Image (spheres, helix red, strand yellow):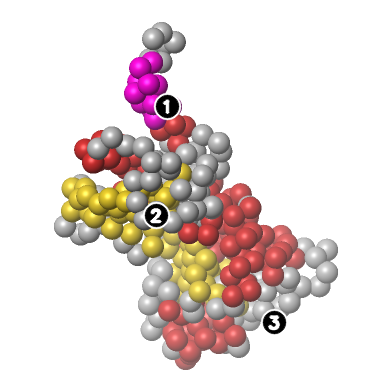
Amino acid sequence: MSTIEIRKISITALDTDAIVNAANEELWAGGGVCGAIFAAAGRDRLQKACDKIGHCDTGSAVITPGFDLKARYVIHAVGPRWKDGSHGEPEQLYGAYYRSLELAAANQCLSSGFPLISAGIFGYPVQGAWRQALAACADFLDRHDGLTMEIVFAALSDGIIAAGRKELLRSGASRYKIAERNDWKRLDMPKQHDTFILRRPFTARQMAALRRGNIPQVMEDKWFWFMEGNTLFAHRSWTGVCIYRMEIKSDGDHAVTVNRDPEQYKCASAEEDVRQLNKLLDWWTQEPYDHYHEWLDETADALAKAGKNTDGNR
């Protein structure tokens, strides 16, 4: 279950298996992101490892140990210097990302952290830089669907982060995005609510599916859900109404708050809510999440409650 995420964090603070350095062809320690990575890894040892390699072409990448970093590896990716966009810059930037991911996968990395390559002193326009970065990542994940890779973009500029999240939502990479509260319309839990305990274990894979969340893509996709910390928020996609808020506990006894506004959500009993929520969680923790068959299932339930059946007879 691969993901793409944009975080406000220094790339040297990431605990991903590999981090990517915005390198130069000579693989020298530079300024900006490059200088910060060399300093955190141990400048002398990292420079010595780079000197053994000697050179990296623009649009490609090489790999060294991470030394003092949390990351096991540093992947040195050389992006292009911006001229006017007609000198192969988009293809070279795409290639730097794609080759970085190939190296990460070849070295058994399950997570990789990137800066926005070439968007600093190399002058690549931010929106275009995000477009190539996300296209390369999405294409790589699409072509390696048997691979699980967590991709994290690290940035400290609010403007760069906002531009990236906007591009991520509207690009083909959106299917890999970790859902966040501002990705869809939503209304807070109303004053009319109730609570109950849901007893249910989750495997690590199921928790990963819940943490990824879901941003609706088509009309039949009835739910938008996301997690903040250990709290799951589940909203109806058509109205944005919050139906469930669940605090996930390590002991398996999860505290659930349920919407009790009769204009927003109708449920006969807490027992019915437990059944309904368990059924939803079964769907949401599948890999991949199958919104269409969930929609069919819920539609059949609604017809049954209305005294109808699915073969057209009453």
Task: Please state the horizontal and vertical placement of residue 57, each as a whole percent of the image.
Answer: 66, 70
Q: Can residue 175 be seen in this view?
A: yes
For mark 3, what is the residue?
121
Per the rendering, the mark at residue 189 is: 2
For the record, the magenta segment spans 296-308
Amino acid type of the residue that numbered disc 2 sits on in the rendered structure: Met
Viewer-proximal residue, 228 or 41? 228
The first of marks 3 and 1 along the sequence is 3
Q: Nearer the viewer, mark 2 or mark 3?
A: 2
Viewer-proximal residue, 70 or 106? 70
The first of marks 1 and 2 along the sequence is 2
Task: Please state the horizontal and vertical placement of residue 100, each as a whole percent of the image.
Answer: 54, 64
For the point 47% across and 84% down, the residue is 46
For mark 1, what is the residue?
299
Amino acid type of the residue that numbered disc 1 sits on in the rendered structure: Thr
Image vertical order of residue 125 relative to residue 33, above or below: above
- How far apart in space, not on screen, are marks 3 and 1 (Cα)? 55 Å
Task: Please state the horizontal and vertical placement of residue 146, each as a whole percent of the image.
Answer: 43, 45
Quarter of the image for residue 217 reads: top right
Q: Which of marks 3 and 1 is in front?
A: 1
For the point 43% across and 36% down, the residue is 290
Amino acid type of the residue that numbered disc 3 sits on in the rendered structure: Ile
Q: Which of marks 1 and 2 is in front?
A: 2
- How far apart in space, not on screen, are marks 2 and 3 (Cα)? 46 Å
For the point 71% across and 60% down, the residue is 91
Q: Is residue 134 a member of the stretch shown in magenta? A: no
